[in-house]
Image (cartoon, rainbow, N blue to C red):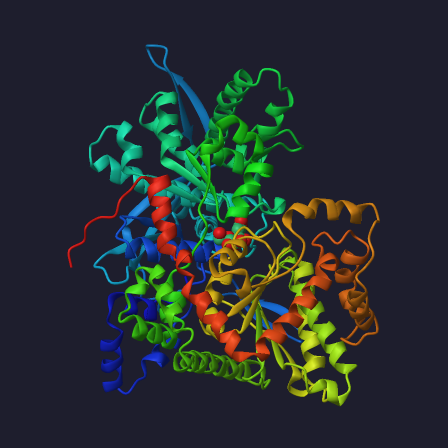
Amino acid sequence: MGRTLDNAMLNVGLKDVARDGLSDLGFRVEDVINQEHDAALGNGGLGRLAACFLDSMATLNYPAWGYGLRYRYGIFKQEIVNGYQVEIPDYWLDNNPWEFPRHEITVDIQFYGNVKKYQDENGRISHSWEDGEIVQAVAYDVPIPGYGTKTTNNLRLWSSKASSGEFDFQKFNAGDYESAVADQQRAETISAVLYPNDNLERGKELRLKQQYFWCAASLFDIVRRFKKTKRAWGEFPDQIAIQLNDTHPTLAIVELQRILIDKEGLEWDEAWSIVTKTFGYTNHTVLPEALEKWSVPLMQNLLPRHLQIIYEINLFFLQSVEKRFPNDRDILSRVSIIEESHPKMVRMAYLAIIGSHKVNGVAELHSDLLKTTLFKDFVKIYGPDRFTNVTNGITPRRWLHQANPRLSALIAEKLGSYDFLKDLTLLDKIEAFVDDKAFREEWAVIKRENKLRLAKHIKATTGFDVNPNALFDVQVKRIHEYKRQQLNIFGVIHRYLSIKAMSAEEKKKVVPRVSIFGGKAAPGYWMAKTIIHLINKVADVVNKDPEIGDLLKVIFIADYNVSKAEIICPASDISEHISTAGTEGSGTSNMKFVLNGGLIIGTCDGANIEITREIGEQNIFLFGNLAEDVEDLRHRHFYGDFKLDPQLERVFDAIKDNVFGDKADFSALISSIEEHGDYYLVSDDFNSYITTHEMVDEAFQNQEEWLVKSIASVARMGFFSMDRVTNEYADSIWNVEPLDVKD
Ligand code: Z57
């Protein structure tokens, strides 16, 4: 979520009041804002997208709730020590004024135990999940104010606590103090810490516990509220829509089915029809290592009744598939929820598809890839209508108005109001001013001030001076091989070596650059950590090289998070969105940078493609191989039909000459490309990448043209408002309309 204060003041329209009041007390509102700790309850784009949803749903007056876990420790704080990432626990709950504990709202959550089968006088069979251990979920509510509306929605976060049942007291009274305390600690462990992987699943039991704890508490809450209305169960899907943000809450499907059949006594078919009408599933990635699979033995032990229900869902599903495709023997094993491996695994994405009425991807290319690759069989089974696309967006309140107040004010001055913050398509009216020299100058001044602000931050945190007139080239996002920060840093090394080889005369023509990196590596992701190490080593060498001076600086900004993004996005000239084609679901920082007047260099991947369509190809620097060619290229690498790009070879030679410290530190990075198939196609795209960067340099030298591109791009970004996204989900998936809210 990032910080709340500034956003809340802007949304409820009290920032000026607060500024005046604080000033009377001798404080500056900015200083107060900067005291707040980020709420860092997610890893990357997935969590921040949910935060944008909340802002947008409240702003548009949708009656919506968010559900999540109240982690005691959010994503770790990153420090860089001798060029290496060091992780520090992020304890953020001291003095958090934004949560309201609801100690009276608790739900008992069960784990382990076993299933008993009963038969009544009429021969009717029922199941009951018994024994096991109980953990309590306690609700903490976080208000989500909409912008320019009276609506404030609720984000309910669950905290785990030992249940104060008789059991514990018995232990306690029997003098078993130690084990009573241990029980308590085990219970509290469930919401203790966020797993710090983005786009990677590791199948740990505690993670499954977190997922079930979250789903069971949230569903109990939803069902309790529905039951108060005394409506018939058949009306449940008319009253309630539940959107699964990736597969992490897929157990909610199983839990609702369990409640309906085991607790409420509905027949299987009636219950299942309610379930599938209620859920929608959003897929955010095609990366195989990110797709959740839970081991059957693990689930059998932790959630025995749920596993039974999953088998039952699978049985009915496979029976229907068999009926439809009697001559296709392989399809059953391909689409089965259970993978017949050792151990057997539950494929959560398949369960999510089967239990939902709509499945969507997050950008056009991504949604197309889902239909033609990952979920191909399911398109055959359910038809194409179950699968759809809703391209991601961002909230303009935080990502324009809050992060870049001066640009927002300039736009408001030209358009006559701040209405564009509620209807971002109104931005198109600023295109009429591109030829207005004074306007362009004001636009340039704002970018410069934003760059100065970032330069100050860089000086304060790294000690390096950067020239605000240089081209600021930014790549900030989670560190991952598929996002290819290695391509970027190899490109930087190429630039460094090229400048070193220049005559004094040639150097005069070089466009000064600051290459800025930021992002966290998952603590166990060794290759990602190696990339961070290389970036920092290159920075050490380049920034101190007297032959280079201001022509090139390399900066790694430690601890990239939402509040840093709010400083960085408005300060970029060009940002990098350079994933191997077909690997990035959407990307959302690409939108944040363009909305703040930065240009981008990117591959034909994720939402870059639709950004190009909206802003025009003359306003974006695209490069690299296309998604459709990736498979073939990988194949060629595999069969040795591959020649390392010669410019990249020169970069590798420098690394191997220990120019950036001990070459052994980076050997894995090089061998993954030279010897192990270059899975992310760094070498294949290298030439295209560096020549495109030469075009960036050239374009930057014509500042007037650059400004035209910048202004035209911002003017055409209306499509990427989160409000468009929310309305699309509301219309095509949730079937819900906004409520009238009286001012
Ligand atoms: C995550 O941050 C995303 C997808 C995942 O499956 C997981 Br796990 C974490 C990201 C995608 O990588 C981005 O491309 C996308 O923009 C974002 O989710 C929001 O859809």
Which quadrant does the N terminus fall into? bottom left
**The C terminus is located in which quarter?**
bottom left
Identify whether 534 is placed above or below 293.
Answer: below
Q: Is residue 13 above or below residue 133?
A: below
Residue at 39% x, 22% y is 268
Q: Please name the residue shown 31% across and 42% down the image.
A: 221
Q: In this figure, what is the number of numbered marks?
A: 0
**277 sits left or right of 583 in the view:** left
Q: Residue furthest front?
A: 435
Question: Is 174 placed left or right of 618 in the picture?
Answer: left
Choose top left, top right, bottom left or bottom right for residue 215.
top left
Relative to 621, is 246 above or below? above
Determine the image quadrant of residue 419.
bottom left
The single residue placed furthest to the top in the displayed view is 122
Residue 519: tell me if it is visible: no
Q: Residue furthest left?
A: 742
Image coords of residue 211 (percent x, y): 47, 44
Q: Is residue 212 visible?
A: yes
Is 516 situated left or right of 149 in this image? right
Residue found 64% across the figure and 48% down from its top: 627
Q: Nearer the viewer, residue 401 or 166?
A: 401
Residue 380 is situated, as x and y percent measured from the top left of the image, at 54, 28
Q: Position of residue 600 (x, y in %)?
A: 55, 66
Q: Nearer the viewer, residue 47 or 146?
A: 146
Residue sitting nearer the eye, 678 or 371? 371
